[in-house]
Image: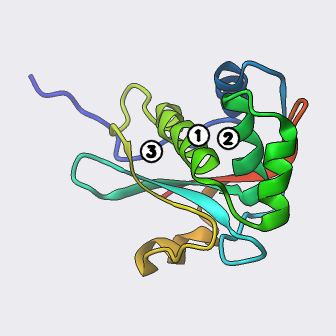
Amino acid sequence: MSTTTTEITPLPTAKDVRDLLEGMLGRGVDVTTGGAMVDPGAGDGAQVGIYVDRHLGLRALVIADLALAARAGAAIALVPAGGAEVAIEEGQLSPALYENAYEILNVMASLFNVEGAPHVKLDACYGPGEALPADVAAWVLAYVRRLDLDVDVKGYGPGRLSILAV
């Protein structure tokens, strides 16, 4: 007997995102829908997670602006908030903050892995200022199933997050 799966990667809810971040960061996180789209090509850029299925087909993107990547990356490692602020002022993530934010993006794959949907995994991660592959860049500002959020990590501050299911 074969198992049937839908071909659609689900878009998580804002509550799902908040619950995951609060669990990972061990602190309160406020999440508000209706935020602006995060554009990695604007300002100081963003950290972009690219999620693929078992056939390496693009399924989802998670895009955290520099502020959120720095603040969440600091919060998960209990780095003082000042460390995140330095990264934001300099317009780039330190290697440690990049790795911490990468790990958050890796765990965020669980938001897409629900029963009946194709299994996805984090395939690649691009830091602020890094050029995205052309096939990925075309999706960043597309009007697809997406969730654009304003996120505030208690004790660390605000940032923006865009989640796209393609």
Residue holding disc 2: 73
Rate crowding at label 1 as few (under 14), some (14 to 19) or many (20 or more) other CA atoms within 10 Å. many
Establish if 54 lies above or below 39.
Answer: above
Q: Amino acid at mark 2?
A: Gly
Residue at point 78% right, 75% down?
43
Q: Residue furthest left?
A: 1
Q: Can I make out residue 33 in this image?
A: no
One can see residue 30 in this view: yes
Task: Determine the secondary structure under disc 3.
Answer: loop
Residue type at mark 3 is Thr
Q: Which residue is mark 1?
A: 100
Task: Mark 2 or mark 1: name the one nearer the start of the chain.
Answer: 2
The quarter of the picture where the N terminus appears is: top left
Mark 1 vs mark 3: in front: 1
At a point 64% along the width and 24% down the height, the residue shown is 24
Choose mark 3 or mark 2, whichever is in front: 2
In contact (CB < 8 Å): disc 2 and disc 1: yes
